C-alpha cells in the first residue's frame, strides 16, 4: 500500500518536472522543441518497451492457469455455471458501456497529438482500416506460437492459450497439477515484474509529458480534465446499470447490502486495491445472509473474472488513446478489441495497474501508439480509485445474486451466530 502511494507521488513529481521542463522549452526555445521532444521521449520509450517485454508471457501464463483451474468449477456444476453467466454478462456490459460512452463523449478529441513513432501517417491510416476475412483469419490463428510470442500478437497467443488451457483441464489431475503449478509460479513472477517495471513509470511520464508540452503547449491539462470528467460519468452509468440489475434480483435488500459493504467500498476507493478488502467483504457478505460456501467459491472467482470497473476502463482508455492521436477505428475493429480485452484481462486481478499492460498490448495490436499510455499515467491513480470501488460492488452483487438464485440467501442471523461462535 505504502509502495503504491510512493509510486503515485513519484509520478506526480515527474509530471510537475516534465511540465516545467517542457514549458520552458515551449516558451523560450521554440526552435529547439522538436529535437528536444524527440530525445526526451526516449525515457517514455524505455518504459513502454519494458512493458511490452512481458506482455506475451503474462497473457499466456495467466490465461492457461485460469482456464486449467476452471475444471474445478465443472465439478461444482450448477453454482459455477450461474457464476460464469453473471461474470461473462457483467464483463461484456462493462466493456460495451466503456466503448459506447468513449465514442459518444469523445474525450480524446479535445486535442490531437502527432504520431512520430510510425513511418508515416498513411501507413497508420492503412493499418486502421477494417480487416478482410483472410486478414482476420491470419490475425487470429497463429502460424507459429513462437512467432506470435516474438511479435506480441496478443490474439494469436490468446487462441493458443485457450486451447492449451482446455487440454490441460481435460487431462488427469496427476499430470496437470505440476504443470499448472509451474505456470502459476511463472505468472506470479511476471506479475511481480510488473511491480518493478512500474517504478520506471515516473521517467516515462516525465519524458512523455515534457515532449508533449514542449511541442503542444499546456493544452494537455484540458485533456486531463475532460478525460476524468467523462470517465467518472461512464463509471456512474455502469453503477446505475449494476444497481438496477441488483435491485431486480435482490429487491429492497439491495439497500441493506450497500449498507453492509460501505466500509469495503470506501477502503477500496482510498487504497485503489479491491483485494485489500477481500477479508472484510467475505465477512460482510456472510453477515448479509449469503451462504458461506457460496461466498468462499464465488468471491475468489470474481476477483479474476468479474472486474467490472477495470473492464470498462480498458475499452475507454484504449479508444481514448486512439482518439488523441487522431486514429479512426472501424466498428469491426472496436468489437474485435472488446473481445480481445474480454479474454486477455482475466487473471491479473489485484495487481495494481496490471491492466495498463493489457491496454499497451491492445494498442500495439490495433496500430495505436502504445506510448499514449504514459500520457494518462499521471491521472490513472484517480481512475483506479473508481475502478477498484466498482470491482468490489460488482463482486458483492455477483455473490449475493448467486446466493439468491440458489435459495441460500438468508437474513444474516445464522451467519452472525457462526461468526460470533
Image (cartoon, rainbow, N blue to C red):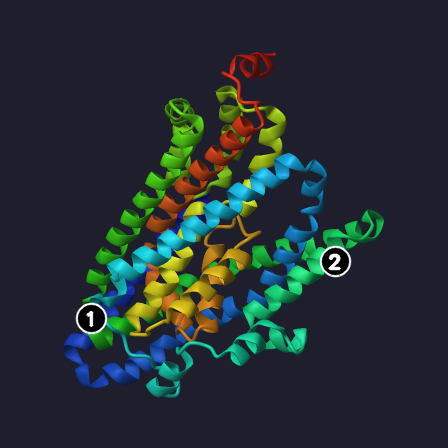
Checking the image for residue 225, the label placed there is none
Q: Is residue 385 left or right of residue 394?
A: left
| Residue that mark 1 sits on | 23
The quarter of the rendered structure image containing the C terminus is top right
Give me the residue at 55% from left, 43% from top: 85
Measuring from the top left, give residue 331's x and y in whole percent.
38, 67
Secondary structure under badge 2? helix
Q: Is residue 80 left or right of residue 12?
A: right
| Residue that mark 2 sits on | 167
- Which of 261/53 is in front? 261
Q: CA distance from mark 1 to mark 2?
A: 56 Å
User: Which mark is in front, 1 or 2?
Assistant: 2
Q: Residues within 10 Å of mark 1 (few under 14, many from 20)?
A: many
Measuring from the top left, give residue 417's x and y in whole percent.
57, 11
Q: Is residue 398 visible?
A: yes
Give me the residue at 30% from left, 69% from top: 323
Amino acid at each position: 500500500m505504502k509502495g503504491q502511494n510512493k509510486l503515485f507521488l513519484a509520478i506526480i513529481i515527474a509530471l510537475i518536472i516534465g511540465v516545467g521542463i517542457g514549458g520552458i522549452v515551449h516558451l523560450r526555445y521554440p526552435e529547439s522543441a522538436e529535437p528536444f521532444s524527440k530525445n526526451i521521449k526516449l525515457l517514455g520509450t524505455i518504459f513502454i518497451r519494458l512493458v511490452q517485454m512481458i506482455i506475451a508471457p503474462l497473457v499466456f501464463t495467466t490465461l492457461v492457469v485460469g482456464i486449467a483451474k476452471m475444471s474445478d468449477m465443472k465439478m461444482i456444476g450448477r453454482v459455477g455455471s450461474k457464476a460464469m453467466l453473471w461474470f461473462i454478462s457483467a464483463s461484456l456490459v462493462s466493456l460495451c458501456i466503456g466503448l459506447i460512452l468513449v465514442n459518444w463523449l469523445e474525450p480524446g478529441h479535445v486535442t490531437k497529438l502527432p504520431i512520430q513513432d510510425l513511418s508515416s501517417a498513411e501507413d497508420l491510416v492503412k493499418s486502421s482500416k477494417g480487416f478482410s476475412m483472410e486478414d482476420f483469419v491470419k490475425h487470429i490463428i497463429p502460424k507459429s506460437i513462437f512467432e506470435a510470442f516474438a511479435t506480441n500478437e496478443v490474439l494469436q497467443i490468446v487462441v493458443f492459450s485457450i486451447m492449451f488451457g482446455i487440454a490441460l483441464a481435460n487431462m488427469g489431475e496427476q499430470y496437470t497439477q505440476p504443470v499448472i503449478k509451474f505456470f502459476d509460479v511463472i505468472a506470479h513472477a511476471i506479475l511481480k515484474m510488473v511491480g518493478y517495471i512500474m517504478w520506471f513509470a515516473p521517467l516515462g511520464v516525465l519524458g512523455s509529458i515534457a515532449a508533449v508540452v514542449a511541442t503542444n503547449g499546456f493544452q494537455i491539462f484540458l485533456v486531463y480534465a475532460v478525460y476524468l470528467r467523462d470517465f467518472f460519468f461512464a463509471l456512474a452509468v455502469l453503477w446505475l446499470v449494476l444497481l438496477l440489475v441488483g435491485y431486480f434480483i435482490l429487491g429492497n435488500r439491495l439497500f441493506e447490502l450497500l449498507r453492509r459493504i460501505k466500509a469495503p467500498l470506501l477502503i477500496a476507493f482510498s487504497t485503489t486495491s479491491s483485494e485489500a478488502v477481500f477479508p472484510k467483504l467475505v465477512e460482510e457478505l456472510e453477515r448479509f445472509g449469503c451462504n458461506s460456501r457460496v461466498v468462499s467459491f464465488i468471491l475468489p472467482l470474481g476477483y479474476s473474472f468479474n472486474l467490472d470497473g477495470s473492464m470498462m476502463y480498458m475499452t475507454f482508455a484504449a479508444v481514448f488513446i486512439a482518439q488523441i492521436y487522431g486514429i479512426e477505428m472501424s466498428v469491426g475493429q472496436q468489437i474485435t478489441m472488446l473481445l480481445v480485452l474480454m479474454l486477455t484481462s482475466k487473471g491479473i486481478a489485484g495487481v495494481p495497474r496490471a491492466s495498463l499492460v493489457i491496454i499497451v498490448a491492445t494498442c500495439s495490436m490495433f496500430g495505436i501508439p502504445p506510448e499514449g499510455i504514459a500520457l494518462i499515467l499521471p491521472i490513472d491513480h484517480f481512475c483506479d480509485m473508481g475502478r477498484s470501488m466498482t470491482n468490489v460492488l460488482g463482486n458483492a452483487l455477483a455473490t449475493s445474486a448467486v446466493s439468491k438464485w440458489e435459495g441460500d440467501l438468508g437474513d444474516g442471523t445464522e451467519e452472525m451466530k457462526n461468526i460470533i461462535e
